[in-house]
Image (tube, rainbow, N blue to C red):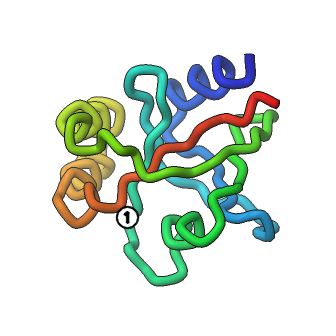
């Protein structure tokens, strides 16, 4: 049930709150996309202290979908190569208005594709 709520929210909202690691206090708003009922995000900033690198150290975290907060596990998708084109298209389709389009074109570049992460909702 939590996954359905999260998927619906992410499909219809551009910014989704994320907490990377078990000890982060505040949510950071990032772009997420849904592909095959799976949740993906790519790091934009590529900084050493990014949410992406924090998840590499501690895979536990949370996403905020409106009034709902869901515990997640973050993983590097094993099938990233196979999904890259579909994820790219989803970014270009979802973030296709105004100034977002320039960032959408940027986030489908190799350096960002290499920083793709999948978020799995903890249903327990």
In-image side of 1 versus 77 (left or right): right
Q: In the image, residue 111 lies at what x, y percent?
A: 22, 66
Q: Is residue 78 visible?
A: yes
Decide which of 46, 98 is in the foreground and name it: 46
In this image, 100 relative to 65: left or right?
A: left
Left or right of 13 in this view: 111: left
User: Residue at point 79% right, 40% down?
Assistant: 69
Q: Which residue is found at the position 71% from the left and 59% from the top?
A: 27
102 to 63, vertically: above or below:
below
* Residue at the spot of label 1: 44
- What is the x, y in percent for residue 58? 65, 66
Q: Residues within 10 Å of mark 1 (few under 14, many from 20)?
A: some
Residue lying at the far front of the rendered structure: 78
In this rendering, the answer to whether 111 lies above or below 67 is below
Q: Which quarter of the figure has residue 67?
A: top right
Quarter of the image where the N terminus is located: top right
Q: Is residue 88 above or below residue 38?
A: below
The residue lying at 70 percent from left, 55 percent from top is 61
Can you give x and y, in whole percent of width and height, for residue 112 in the image?
A: 28, 61
Within the image, what quadrant is residue 26 found in? Answer: bottom right
Q: Picture coordinates of residue 65 (x, y %)?
A: 69, 36
User: What count of labels does the image hold?
Assistant: 1
Q: Nearer the viewer, residue 66 or 2?
A: 2
Q: Secondary structure at mark 1?
A: loop
Q: Is residue 29 above or below residue 98?
A: below
Residue drawn at (29%, 44%) of the image: 80
Q: Is 88 left, or right, of 12 in this rendering?
A: left
Q: Is residue 97 visible?
A: no
Give the quarter of the image for residue 55: bottom right
């Amino acid at each position: 049930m939590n996954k359905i709520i999260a998927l619906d929210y992410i499909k219809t909202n551009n910014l989704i709150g994320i907490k990377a690691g078990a000890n982060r206090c505040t949510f950071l708003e990032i772009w997420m996309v849904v592909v095959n009922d799976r949740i993906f995000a790519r790091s934009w900033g590529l900084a050493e202290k990014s949410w992406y690198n924090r998840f590499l150290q501690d895979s536990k975290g949370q996403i905020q979908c409106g009034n709902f907060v869901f515990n997640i596990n973050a993983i590097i998708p094993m099938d990233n190569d196979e999904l890259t084109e579909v994820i790219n298209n989803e970014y270009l389709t979802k973030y296709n208005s105004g100034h977002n389009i320039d960032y959408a074109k940027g986030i489908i570049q190799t350096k960002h594709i290499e920083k793709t992460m999948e978020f799995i909702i903890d249903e327990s």
